[in-house]
Amino acid sequence: MKKRLHLYLVFLVVVSVCFLAVGYGIYIIKDIPSIKVLKNLENKPASSIFDANGQLIYLIVPDNRVFVQYSKIPKHVKMAFLAAEDADFFKHGAVEFQSLIRALLKNVIYGKVVQGGSTITQQVIKTLILGPERSLLRKAREAILAYKLERYLTKKDILNLYLNNIYMGHGVYGIEAASQIYFGKHVWEITTAEAALLAGIVQAPSRNTPKRNPGNARIRQEYVINQMFEKNMINEKTKKVLLNDRISIREDNGVFTDSYFKDFVFQYVEEKYGKGVFSRKRLQVYATVDSQFQRLAEEAVRRGLSQYEQRKGEYTVSYSLDKRKWDDFMKTVDRNLKLSKLLSGKTYNVLISERVKDGYSAFIGSEKAILAMEDFPFKPGDVVKAIYNGQDKKKLHKFQPVRTLKVEGALLCMDVDNGYVLAMVGGRDFEKSPYNRAVFAKLQSGSAFKPFIYATALKKGYDIDSVIPDEPRSYPGGPGGGAWTPRNYDGKYEGQITIKDAVAYSKNAATVSLLQDVGINAVKETIAELGINTELPNNLSIALGSSNLTLLDLVKGFSAFANGGYRIKPIMIRKIVDSENNVLEENGIEKHRALPEEIAQKMNILLKGPVEYGTAKGASRIGFAVAGKTGTTSNYYDALFVGYSPHIATGVWVGFDARTTLGKGESGARVCLPIWMNFMASALRRYPSIDFGAQSEPVATGHPEEGLKMKNESLRGMD
């Protein structure tokens, strides 16, 4: 009887365990996703943006993921990723139990999931189906799906899914996108050393990318190369070559770079054709931007803002390290960075060690040196961004610590004959501030508005040699309802002055007097004819640029002077074609007569004055016929320069978003003119050197130089 009862109890336990096992099994597979979705998985349609020369400049892809066929992936790339993540992938099954047991023991010791032990098949399941959650239940489901996947797809197909969908940092997925942003190459063009660097990222993309942490990236690359050697994928000679192979990392993100122009195109197309159109259709957008001009513009703005900050900014420390953490910091630096290979003008991270007689003892990369930075109050442990300036007579390495401010800048360049926007810089850093100041910011234009008043005067019968009063006068409508007396920037008055000199020297008093004579309504008509749609206040302060215009408005208006008097419609997109080759839109040139040709030619003469002998003196020395006007608003809140050649017009703005002063003397000539000259001196080399109104008249050549530093007087709204 007891034996029978014992057997009965054993039977109940076994049945209960079976029921529990079945129940848990049902629970595990409950709502488990299907792996069939992976059978034909490719990336969604990629839309492309091409520049004015037909060169691919941007890809717009959901998740920044570009699919590449398995046959196009080189063997050395596959080997690098296998060595890094799962060297025996083609030998074991869906789950590798030895690795799993090691991971399980480690997880038990730590009391939580700290190591995965996943095969590449399991990683595909995690990446594309289950997500990154760490739990024992998810791990069980992952194993079940991994077995199903290996029955459903070949090993090659699974590896291809992995390589095309693994996260590679900086917002991109897959090895093709990663090859583009890190090296500017297709995956079939990268070297074995580059492949090893990419494979090293996978372990921790937030920490191991060569852009964010070159030291960690180098350590991981060495690990992958050594693994390739250990797994007999390469010989020892190749290993040594790979470990010494220098790799150049692309500074931007290539076709995946976020930029002001790309964002403008994206917003325009989605607004017109519907949200998500880039994901639904494989669009080809043919833009007007010129890649070379765009690079020149970005560099000119970056350099100009840096020069301003070196004058006005404060030295800042990126962060400070306790001495006990210096060793940890040194493990993360780029060990390829040597003192002998420093590039003059480039910015580096410097770890201050101690103050010495001639400056500071500091670490650059993995090497220590005496740096000539004796005037700056840093302390040991400070990590400072500094610009390398070569060596001094004592063979000390000279560094200039970077000053920082939140100053912003914008540049817009347009072809005056067809309206193509060739370059657009909406700010100093799109990722930090995507607001496009070149197109959307309403700016007080300062004296850059004055040419529209003088164009109106010429239409009303004035000439470039006409004499107008230049003297202090009071007008009604000042602050608090009292009188307003505009003053000249330098505090000097000529009594009587020609229009040509009034423009060249940007005389406030003379311009306001002229505006009163020609009338505000007449000026409104002029800017409307030039295609500038803005409401002007009905007071004389518009003579000093109190009205709100965009930089695009100013460039568009000045273009009419350059092209003989035609209002030209700005064009950013030439054509949009869908995946079936249907032309969704095509933007042709729109030109309309806005000014008589004679008036436009006289405006060219007037606006050559500032660059030849006036407020922008020196701009003409770039070696091409140019004209333009400086602008500075009250209290130096905004600085501008808008200028042009017979071919292109370019506007530059510098200021703070928070409407703070740039500082005494930081005028349009001081801040913006050097940016404009830097850009135009290079851009104009593409065009024949002709003068305004001439077919091939040669112009004397010279060298760019910075704009003039001008005095500050009490009246504001000047240059």
Image (tube, grey):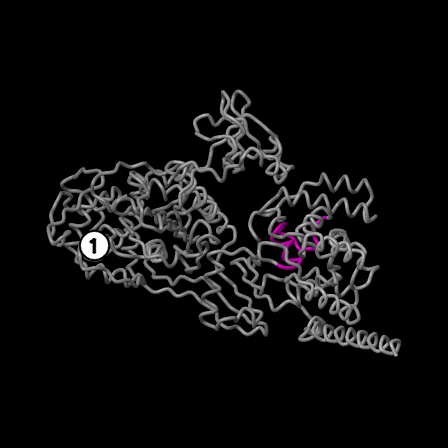
Which structural element holds mark 1?
helix
Quarter of the image containing the C terminus? top left
Number of marks in the rendered image? 1
Corner quadrant of residue 101: bottom right
Q: State the image coordinates of residue 117 (x, y, percent, origin top left).
A: 74, 56
Residue in the image at 60% along x and 69% along y: 45
Q: Nearer the viewer, residue 272 or 22?
A: 22
Residue in the image at 72% along x and 52% along y: 106
Q: State the image coordinates of residue 536 (x, y, percent, origin top left).
A: 23, 60
Q: Is residue 560 visible?
A: no
Q: Is residue 618 visible?
A: yes
Residue that carries the numbered disc 1 in the rendered image: 457
Q: State the image coordinates of residue 473 (x, y, percent, origin top left).
A: 11, 46
Q: State the image coordinates of residue 47 (x, y, percent, origin top left).
A: 57, 66
Circle 1: residue type: Ala
Residue in the image at 26% along x and 44% along y: 635
Give the residues drawn in magenta, as a range: 173-191
Corner quadrant of residue 213: top right
Quarter of the image containing the N terminus? bottom right
Question: From what the image shows, is residue 169 above or below residue 394?
Answer: below
View extreme (front): residue: 1
Question: From what the image shows, is residue 567 above or below residue 219?
Answer: below
Characterize the magenta stretch by its predominant secondary structure.
helix
Horizontal relation, residue 449 to residue 8: left or right: left
Q: Nearer the viewer, residue 518 or 675?
A: 675
Q: Residues within 10 Å of mark 1 (few under 14, many from 20)?
A: many
